[in-house]
Image (spheres, rainbow, N blue to C red):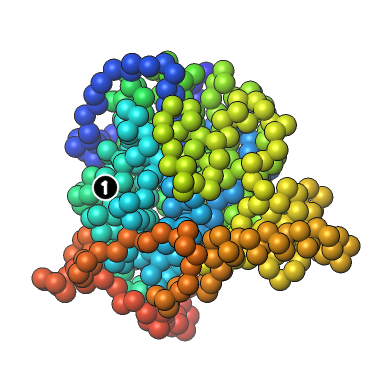
Amino acid sequence: MSLPIRFAAALGAIAALLACADPGSGVRDSADRPNFIVVFVDDMGYGDIGAFGSTQNRTPAIDAMAEAGMKLTSFYAHPVCTPSRAALLTGCYPIRNGLQTGLWHPVLMPGDPQGIHPDEITVAEVLRDRGYATGLIGKWHLGDQPEFLPNQHGFEYFFGLPYSNDMSPFMPLNPRNHPPLPLLRNGKVVREVPEDQSFLTGSYTAEALEFIERHSKEPFFLYIPHSMVHVPLWAGEDFKGSSTNGILGDCIEELDAGVGQIRAKLEEHGIADNTLLVFTSDNGPARGSSGPLRGRKGTTYEGGLRVPAVAWWPGTIPAGSSYDDVSTTMDILPTFAALAGAETPADRLDGFDISDILKGNTAKPSPYAAFYYYRGYELRAVRSRNWKLHSDGTLYNLEEDIAESADRASERPEVAARLSGLLEEGRRNLGDGPVWPLDPGIALPETARRVGRIDGEPKLLIPRHGLEGAAAHEPPVRSKTVETKPPPGYVRPANW
């Protein structure tokens, strides 16, 4: 049954943004190639939706997905934005491709000279080569120089932001000298994003609905990495003040409504039964709830990397099912490729094809003998089955102690020893270094690939106000020393 559409009026306000949308083409020629949609929310915590225990936020559309599909309760991303997106799109630990951090910050910043390497193989490229229409609507954050943008990495259509929505001159005090925030369509700046970002979520949803409309008769892959609920928090006009959990709840309820609209559009075109829809988050919460988990965004406790995840595919994924062993965003590429009958770059994948699990084999053990938790380039922990060992020697049984509150290392030295061996194996195969590689000579294993880097000087996609020529396109100062302290009496805006 179609879910109610709560902000139809808002769609008209952004119709102009759709005028330059890419044309649809082709006719579906093979019923054995399902469509794929990934809704990737920014900074949503494990406890931020009803299906994972939230009593603060109303998420009826996502909860209905879980009731009709599968909850992945031990689903992992990475602690912050750039590495998390790299892992999802390439199917491997981001330390493999140099995207574990930015150049001088834990994530890529405007005008950085590096980004995803042209030789990396993304899930969009794999599916495009199998005949899929591919689109990205939302936040990219894998490099903003032209050779790093989505259209160069398998996405035929792109509408959204090149990086996080806080990388804007409206950031309080703007300590990192951010330029105007550009909204892009296929690499071209559509407009400058103002301080009021309340149109963003609605515009992404409208673009997603248009993409589905255009490509409903052919196989498609649609990746929707939302900017919300990353700060600054802005909800659409129809959602402001509508929740019981402040601006955060307003934003979450707008995201939920968008999921409902997407499902309704699939049903309208009769393709719901041939579409795998995955909803998840890029890392733990910055402002929201980790639920029963310890830690938040940026940490390597469970609350930093374990995220809510729901998979929905009517008639294929058993309704009301749950998978409680380890699965990760790195499984997206191999799973989608297997379901599409596409070739996979098997020599570089750390993720696994979990399509049989999604189809109902939930008793199957996780294919991960070990899952590694990184903060920057530093290996902080490893999970093997129900046990998790931190690099400081603390050991937790996550089945019995999801909150990581009772250290079991002294009681189970044999388990600690086994996982210590896995940590050493991770150091050899993946690496273990500083929090981020300020030293370009950081030693990494032979399995590591090069990060993409441009030749010459990087330029901003959008000029700074009041400047001309090269100065208008000069990147921010690449030094953490530009941080400033707020003046006496300064109050940070409520939506940050």
Query: For the point 78% across and 63% down, which residue is it?
Result: 417
Query: For the point 48% across and 80% down, which residue is it?
Result: 489
Residue denoted by label 1: 152
Q: How many dots with numbers?
A: 1
Most foreground residue, 380 or 321: 380
Q: Residue 338: percent from the left, percent from the top?
A: 48, 30
Using the rendered image of the protein, determine whether residue 87 is visible from the camera's viewpoint.
Answer: yes
Most foreground residue, 173 or 369: 369
Q: What kind of residue is marked 1?
A: Gln
Q: 165 above or below 314?
A: below
Q: Residue 215: percent from the left, percent from the top?
A: 31, 25
What secondary structure is marked by label 1?
helix
Q: Residues within 10 Å of mark 1 (few under 14, many from 20)?
A: some
196 vs 21, left or right, is: right
Q: 341 above or below 388?
A: above
Most foreground residue, 179 or 90: 90
323 vs 93, left or right, is: right
Q: Quadrant of residue 174?
A: bottom left
Q: Residue 364: percent from the left, percent from the top?
A: 70, 33
